[in-house]
Each structure stands twice: as C-alpha cells, then as structure tokens.
C-alpha cells in the first residue's frame, strides 16, 4: 500500500490522471529555481520599500501583490503586500477594518499563521506586508483532488486548529485575553506550502475584545457555509 501523501507531494502530482496522488514526478530543484526567479525579477513598481513583482489578486477591499523586500548588503526576502483599494481608502469604516486586521495580525506569532511583517502607508493608501507562502490554497487542492486522503485532511485541520488556539488564547500587554475570534475560516484562507507547512491567512474579519467599534447590527461577516451557529444567530462569540 502506498504511503499517505503529505502536503510536500502536492507539487509533484500529475494532472493527466484520474488519481492525482499517483506517479509522483520529483523535482527537487523547484524551490531553488523559484527563489532565483523571485530574486532576479525586475520590479514593476514599489509600495513603500517593497519592490512589486506582479499582482496576485484583487478583492472587494484590497489588492494583493507579489513583492520583494530588498535590504542592505544584498539581503532580501520574498513577500506579499496587501494594499487597500483607492476607492476604499476614502471610506473611514473600511480603512478602520483594514487597520484592525493589521493590528491583530501583527500580534500573532505562530508557525501556522502567516506572519505579517509591518503595516504602512504609501501615497495615501494603507498596506500591510506579509510572509510569502510558496504553495497552494486548500480550496485548489480540494477542487483538483476531490476528497483528501485522511492523513492530509487530519494534518491540515490540526494545523489550522493550532493557529486558531494561538489566536484565541493570546493576551495583551496588560495580561488580559485579547478575545480574538477568527470568523472566516474557509479553504480559501488556508495555504498548504510545498514544504509541508499549513498556514492560516487573513484576519481581516476577526473579532477582538479590544475593538473600538462593534459590527453593525444585522450585518453578518463571513461566509454562511462556514459560520458557527452562534454567529449566524447573532449571539456573542466566545474567544
């Protein structure tokens, strides 16, 4: 019996077969080639100190860019920059939500949470810079492979649960619980790295005890299919 696949196997799966987990085709130099390509790509622009290499996605509130953080003495690291959209930057409510995400994300330090490096402003638009995860969305894996092997599903769920536990139990400088509740845990917000690490992304609609504003009455934040019963009913969410 073939061993259960791990996230590391995802980069090897062939698409021209009914079973995406069979006949792996090793490509051990892929990480090195990707690293070299990111290092040598000419930037198409800059956001703050980050060289923009290309656009990854655009959402309703922000746009996401692949970037490179060029530092002194030739040091650099790949990254992702999330910048608020121009038409959103004039809306105080949306800007407040974006800043809230940045503040919550900066307080989280866990192997299964995508690290946020900094929050800044460039030409009047707020942005946050974060870790680049070389991998695929859990949604893409599910759409391509269908039902995941039990070992991979269990590993992914366990790692996401560890990330959520870290957020829920985080305390502030005063020693009091921050009460962070992540309200939008979906396959689109989980990255599976080719190195085997599972990362939870995007705390944009997390709820924390320290928020200065409450969610507007009657407004549900998150995807209905992934909401807890108490959130759907508009009840208090426990951290």
Image (spheres, grey):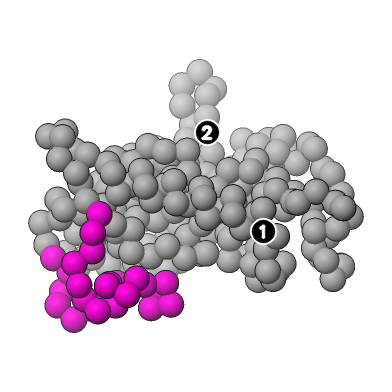
Q: Nearer the viewer, residue 164 or 134?
A: 164
Q: Position of residue 77 (x, y in %)?
A: 52, 33
Quadrant of the image containing the C terminus: bottom left
Residue 157 in view (yes/no): yes
Residue 20: mark: none
Q: Position of residue 122 (x, y in %)?
A: 30, 48
Q: Which residues are magenta?
A: 214-239
Residue on which the image places disc 2: 77
The image quadrant of residue 129 is: top left
Determine the main secondary structure of the stretch shown in magenta: loop
Q: Secondary structure at mark 1?
A: helix
Residue at 80% x, 37% y is 28
Q: CA distance from mark 2 to mark 1?
A: 34 Å
Q: Nearer the viewer, residue 71 or 118?
A: 118
Residue at 27% x, 72% y is 231
Residue on which the image places disc 1: 150
Taking 168 as reference, is 226 left or right? right
Q: Is residue 146 above or below residue 69?
A: below
Taking 172 as reference, is 163 left or right? right
Q: Residues within 10 Å of mark 1 (few under 14, many from 20)?
A: few
Q: Position of residue 128 (x, y in %)?
A: 35, 47
The image quadrant of residue 196 is: top right
Q: Nearer the viewer, residue 151 or 83?
A: 151
Q: Position of residue 81 (x, y in %)?
A: 43, 49
Residue at 30% x, 49% y is 168
Residue 11 in view (yes/no): no
Q: Secondary structure at mark 2?
A: strand
The image quadrant of residue 18 is: bottom right
Residue at 37% x, 47% y is 165
């Amino acid at each position: 019996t073939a061993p259960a696949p791990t996230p590391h196997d995802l980069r090897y799966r062939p698409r021209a077969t009914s079973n995406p987990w069979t006949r792996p085709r090793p490509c051990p130099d892929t990480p090195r080639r990707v690293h070299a390509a990111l290092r040598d790509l000419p930037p198409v622009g800059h956001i703050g100190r980050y060289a923009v290499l290309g656009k990854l996605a655009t959402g309703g509130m922000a746009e996401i860019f692949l970037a490179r953080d060029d530092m002194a003495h030739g040091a650099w690291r790949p990254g992702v920059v999330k910048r608020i959209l121009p038409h959103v930057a004039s809306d105080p409510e949306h800007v407040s939500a974006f800043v809230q995400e940045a503040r919550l994300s900066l307080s989280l330090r866990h192997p299964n949470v995508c690290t946020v490096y900094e929050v800044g402003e460039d030409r009047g638009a707020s942005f946050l810079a974060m870790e680049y995860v070389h991998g695929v969305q859990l949604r893409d894996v599910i759409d391509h492979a269908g039902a995941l092997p039990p070992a991979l599903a269990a590993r992914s769920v366990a790692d996401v649960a560890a990330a959520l536990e870290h957020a829920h139990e985080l305390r502030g400088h005063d020693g009091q619980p921050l009460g962070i509740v992540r309200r939008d845990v979906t396959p689109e917000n989980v990255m599976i790295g080719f190195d085997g690490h599972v990362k939870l992304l995007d705390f944009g609609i997390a709820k924390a005890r320290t928020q200065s504003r409450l969610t507007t009455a009657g407004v549900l934040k998150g995807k209905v299919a992934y909401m807890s019963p108490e959130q759907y009913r508009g009840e208090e969410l426990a951290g």
